[in-house]
Image (cartoon, rainbow, N blue to C red):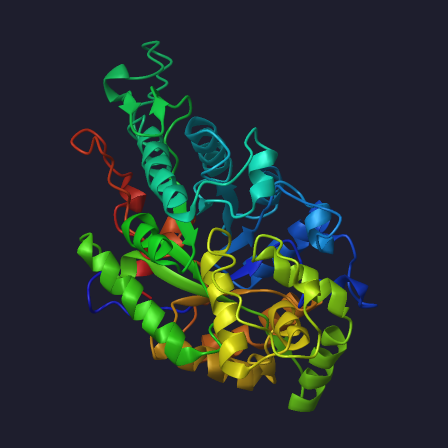
Amino acid sequence: MSSHKRRQLRLAAFLSGIGANVDAWRHPEARSNVAADIESFKEAARIAEAGKFDFGFIADSTFITKDSTSYFLSRLEPITALSAVSSVTSRLGLVATMTTSFSEPFTTARQLNSLDVISGGRAAWNAVTGALEGHARNHGGEKLYEHALRYEIAAEYIEVVKGLWDSWDSDAFVRDKESGQYVDFDKMHTLDHKGAHFSVQGPLNIERSKQGRPVIFQAGASEDGKELAARVADAVFSGDVDDAPRHKAYYDDLKRRAAKYGRGPDDILIFPSITPIVGSTAEEAQRKYREVCELLDIRVAIRYLSRYFSLFDFNQFPLDEPLPELGDIGKDSFRSTAENYLRVAREKKLTLRQLALYAANPADTFVGTPEQIADKLQRLFEDEVVDGFILHAHLHPAGLRDFVEQVVPILQARGIYRREYESDTLRGNLGLSWPESRYAKTAAAPDAERAPASATI
């Protein structure tokens, strides 16, 4: 995107309605089954689309135990759920979390490209490596690969999937009834990949989508994660934005890393998650915040914390004494999140109770009146700490509706957020360029996608 084009704030929403914390389902106004209720997903998606959000996102995990927190125990599989959501939306992007460690690249490529075709070019893939040994045991293994190897495998996996998405030129399927020609096989490309971890012939048995191929998201703030994101991700789910200077350093670092691979700063968009709680007054917003925080059982909070440390048993420590030095636990699990929690505990000398509540409850950074919340979002955006935000609703779907009805109009009036969608594809609305095929000499973008309309606002 050229320098004269104005940056635009981007917004997204979690569709699974998890809530402010893992016990928010206990609130009298909350729906208790939102993680497995497709009607709740659809309602959240419709609210997000009414607010002109860029995408809806579904997180995922394939391992549970009796100690898992509530919303992990029964949840819809992302591709299935987003296929249903696509039928009640027309502009909202659809982001599915799928692993690179416990599935085959061909299957992942086919599922995501099918969602992309079904939705008219609105699909995206949040590529994750998996972070708990139980995931491996549910997929024929015994243990996770160590952290660096998981990312090495992920890098090859993503390249294979992208190669399969390039199996057909955009105009390959002519379907000419007069001549009887269904497809131009000169515009079919066989991958024939043989690498260190995968051997995949191809081609993919589904045509290229309207947006070229699904958008790629990635999460992770470890060195391996940041380097992979800088190379391949169109967008990144980042960590906590409550510490703005730390997040600004992360933002600048990721943009610099992307430049090493010939990418511009607008080629990779960075989205932290936030939990806004809107009140007509600051006091009302704080009351809502306290209500959901008070629902959280400390035992549940500790179980939630342990997930980021390979289910480490924190119950061995006293609740109300500072945590001892814990070394590198979590190094092969959710490494960046675990390191961040240990850093916070160390710097603030937190007890186990305080750390568990810190991890499982949202911060109160985005709790306030619509104007107060809009001010904070605008400041972080204009200071280039973020490109956008992905919202957890503190209660589903009421919290999301409050934000769309009360905060979005303020952002629109200030001229930093769209009033209408610019495109009917996710790639177009995010302002991302047409993805060049590895067979570019024969593959051309459809005219409608050569220059996304979102480039000018």
Using residue 125 as the reference point, say whether residue 447 is left or right of it.
left
Quarter of the figure that contains the N terminus: bottom left
Task: Name above or below for residue 333 compared with residue 286.
Answer: above
What percent of the width, then of the height, locates residue 92? 51, 52
State the image quarter where residue 314 is shown. Answer: bottom right
296 over 217 or under it: above or below: below
Looking at the rendered image, the quarter that the C terminus falls into is bottom left
How many numbered dots are placed on residues in this image?
Answer: 0
Q: Where residue 265 sits in the image (x, y, percent)? A: 26, 63
Q: Is residue 206 visible?
A: yes
Q: Residue lying farthest right?
A: 28
Asked if residue 397 can be seen in this view, the reply is: no
Residue 48 is drawn in which quadrant? bottom right
Q: Residue at x 30, y 29 (%)?
A: 196
Q: Nearer the viewer, residue 281 or 249?
A: 249
Q: Work out whether residue 340 or residue 439 is closer to the camera in this orientation and state it.
A: 340
Near-viewer residue (188 or 21): 21
x, y percentage for residue 69?
Answer: 71, 55
| Drawn side of residue 451 relative to residue 138, left or right | left
Residue 120, horizontal then vertical, whole percent: 46, 40
Most distant residue in the left direction: 441
Q: Residue at x 70, y 73 (%)?
A: 318
Please tell me whether residue 189 is drawn above or below residue 48 in the rendered image: above
Q: Residue at x 46, y 56 (%)?
A: 331
